Image (spheres, coloured by chain):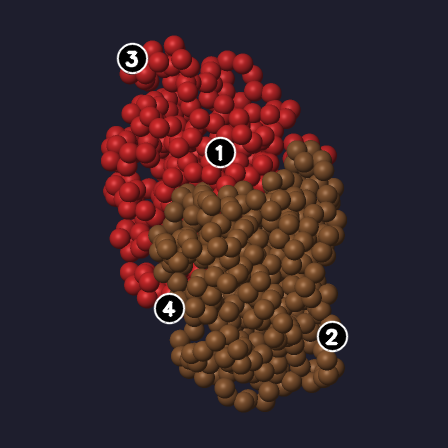
Chain colours: A brown, B red
């Protein structure tokens, strides 16, 4: 039985889970309606004419690695043709209403633009995406929140883009691809973090574009051959960013900065912070500006989205592993809608203690993104 | 109190642990006595004269990343001056006798040679190291076993080197650095695995040389800044190799091949095999030659050395995590002597169930390397 079929069963459990609204921290509207042509009204003439003449020239990973689904998406999902208003209506029914999503965080559009060598072009496309998102999504459906795309190749210009659109109430996060030419703790990026702090916005890192465009190979052993290996490599790169933020002392420099690790898995964090804590004890004389144990920085500054959640072979390891990654403070539910490996809010998790479920499915994200509590204060599903 | 001081306490526990001999799967004799000059008698004149004229020109990671100890070693360890016989006497007292080591596996000399662009030179140095090891170590002290160094830049030549020295009874393993320009599942390496299978020897991968010499940057986000980050990145690269062996189908092609992951940590393997098993279910149509769940290949074909072992924040997670990585079949004790982060056999592990301890400290390695049982059959320490 497919996920979609199972979801449509109105079992008592599913119904009671749906009764209490949730926050979904990783939603995609891809593909952009009409592709890059949809961005043309938001581009300066110079780039509009380039896109018309040569196409969008944005690096992509699909030429290198098969995705799990065609266009990355779930099969059987029939989005009706039409403009953005039609798409929004479809998303309200197929996603927001169906799963009782109080707030849904859209995590960027096409991260390929983060990997082009043409930084000015990247800046123009990011601005166009951000303006398109305001006009067609954020101003039309308040349940959707979104992430600011930035031309991270130029951190100063990125900061300007955050300043330009960051006061829109629908923007709650800055977002970049996991693929990077430098780990995100590097001082190169600090103007971006200054802007994040100015706007009280977390810096989100979403898996994508590892080894693509201007990025180095996806692993320290070069290119992997298959998509399943690529998915595992992504966790390794996210781990690199996590360690980089900590060991470069970013959280000492920016004490209010929060970082979100999106779609790179979760349970690997446990052995990673165990390793870092042990090594910190032995090696902290190398990095005296790292004043606390790495796991403390993680708990205070890092949040993690759940999809794709690993499932231990022994099911009774799941809760202890959640505890080990401090899920009650750090884990936030995400479905990755509409991608092929979508984690349904109704099915992805085994039964959790109610308080923990509430942290993961609502409160951790509400605190991070400064989102209001449930409008109708329904507390069904507690039992 | 330092590790050395603690070890010298003859507490009842330590004494009873020492009573039952062990196998130590990761020992180093570094630095080579006299450095590369010691290899000159084993080099062809062409390279001997090069080493005399220009020095050894071997890439090293110490120019990039601080190690945890000076020359990587424990402080306070006073190796007396003298020739290799003096060194061996010191090692007998300081290591083999002190910790009751029945077999000690030496894991190569200087992996830098795995990263030089000069493949012919790499081949000459590897042969010299292997001959030096036979003459000065293996033929002098039967408790020491060793690993064959190979010029992995040229797999055919590597296979010839394995054939050249592989019949010496002291050689039990082929070894390469974790740093690599291609993941080790790549078909480029298959002549090496044919030779491993011919000689019934595992293929050992030892952390080192990530991002050095001809290798790509150590992470998919480029170069990390500090040694603690570098240590974490190493686990990511080992994870890449593990996935590569599995997804390229190497264990289907070479059903008797065993792989040893050395010094890259252990507990990260649990979430890695959970992730791979889930992804295999969803994505196995991409790699139909991968016939079993990835965790099954891991259990059957992969062995792991223990040092540096991660310690969960909650101590009661340690045994469940050992179970999750199938420690009873796959984990082999290693001390990493004489490196600064040496795991003492007496201290590194908390108390283990006796049967599990025996698997980890002796039997898994004895089975893998075809080593005899304890000579005196002492079974002290059972209680």
Quadrant in the rendering for residue A206: bottom right
**What residue does disc 3 label?**
B45
Q: Position of residue B62 (x, y in %)?
A: 53, 27
Q: CA distance from mark 4 to mark 2?
A: 36 Å
**What residue does disc 2 label?**
A373
Q: Residues within 10 Å of mark 2 (few under 14, many from 20)?
A: some
Q: Is residue A360 left or right of residue B270?
A: right
- Identify which residue is drawn at 39% across, 63% down: A67
**What residue does disc 4 label?**
A70
Label 2 secondary element:
loop
Quadrant in the rendering for residue A247: top right
**Same chain? Circles 2 and 3:** no
Label 1 close to label 2 by CB (< 8 Å): no
Q: Position of residue A351 (x, y in %)?
A: 61, 77
**Same chain? Circles 4 and 1:** no
Q: CA distance from mark 1 to mark 2?
A: 58 Å
Q: Quadrant of the N terminus of chain B?
A: top right
Chain ID, mark 1? B
Along the line of sight, which residue is nearer the eye, B360 or B142?
B360
Viewer-nearest of discs 1 and 2: 2
**What residue does disc 1 label?**
B27
Q: CA distance from mark 2 to mark 3?
A: 78 Å
Mark before the other along the chain sequence, 4 or 2:
4
Viewer-nearest of discs 4 and 1: 4
Label 3 secondary element:
helix
Asked if residue A122 is positioned above or below residue A318 in the image, the reply reads above
Label 4 close to label 2 by CB (< 8 Å): no
Chain ID, mark 2? A
């Amino acid at each position: 039985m497919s996920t979609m079929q199972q979801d449509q069963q109105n079992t008592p459990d599913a119904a009671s889970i749906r009764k209490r609204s949730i926050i979904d921290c990783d939603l995609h509207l891809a593909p952009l309606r009409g592709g890059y042509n949809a961005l043309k009204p938001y581009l300066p003439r110079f780039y509009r004419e380039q896109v018309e003449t040569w196409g969008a020239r944005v690096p992509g990973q699909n030429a290198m690695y098969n995705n799990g689904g065609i266009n990355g998406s779930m099969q059987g999902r029939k989005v009706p043709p039409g403009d953005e208003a039609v798409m929004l209506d479809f998303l309200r029914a197929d996603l927001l209403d169906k799963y009782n999503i109080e707030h849904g965080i859209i995590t960027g559009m096409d991260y390929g633009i983060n990997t082009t060598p043409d930084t000015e072009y990247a800046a123009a496309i990011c601005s166009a995406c951000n303006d398109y998102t305001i006009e067609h999504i954020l101003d039309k459906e308040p349940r959707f929140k979104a992430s600011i795309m930035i031309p991270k190749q130029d951190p100063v210009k990125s900061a300007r883009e955050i300043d330009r659109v960051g006061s829109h109430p629908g923007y709650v996060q800055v977002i970049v691809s996991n693929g990077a030419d430098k780990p995100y703790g590097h001082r190169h990026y600090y103007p971006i973090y200054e802007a994040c702090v100015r706007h009280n916005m977390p810096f989100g890192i979403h898996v994508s574009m590892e080894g693509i465009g201007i990025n180095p190979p996806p692993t320290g052993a070069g290119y992997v051959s298959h998509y399943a290996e690529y998915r595992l490599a992504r966790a390794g790169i996210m781990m690199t960013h996590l360690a980089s933020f900590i060991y470069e002392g970013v959280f000492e420099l920016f004490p209010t900065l929060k970082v979100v690790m999106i779609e790179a898995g979760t349970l690997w964090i446990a052995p990673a912070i165990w390793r870092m804590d042990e090594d910190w004890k032995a090696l902290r004389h190398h990095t005296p500006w790292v004043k606390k144990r790495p796991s403390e920085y993680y708990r205070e500054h890092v949040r993690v989205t759940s999809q794709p959640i690993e499932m231990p072979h022994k099911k009774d390891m799941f809760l202890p592993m959640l505890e080990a990654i401090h899920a009650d403070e750090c884990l936030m539910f995400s479905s990755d809608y509409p991608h092929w490996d979508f984690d349904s809010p109704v099915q992805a998790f085994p039964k959790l203690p109610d308080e923990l479920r509430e942290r993961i499915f609502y409160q951790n994200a509400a605190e991070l993104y400064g989102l209001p509590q449930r409008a109708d204060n329904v507390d069904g599903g507690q039992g």
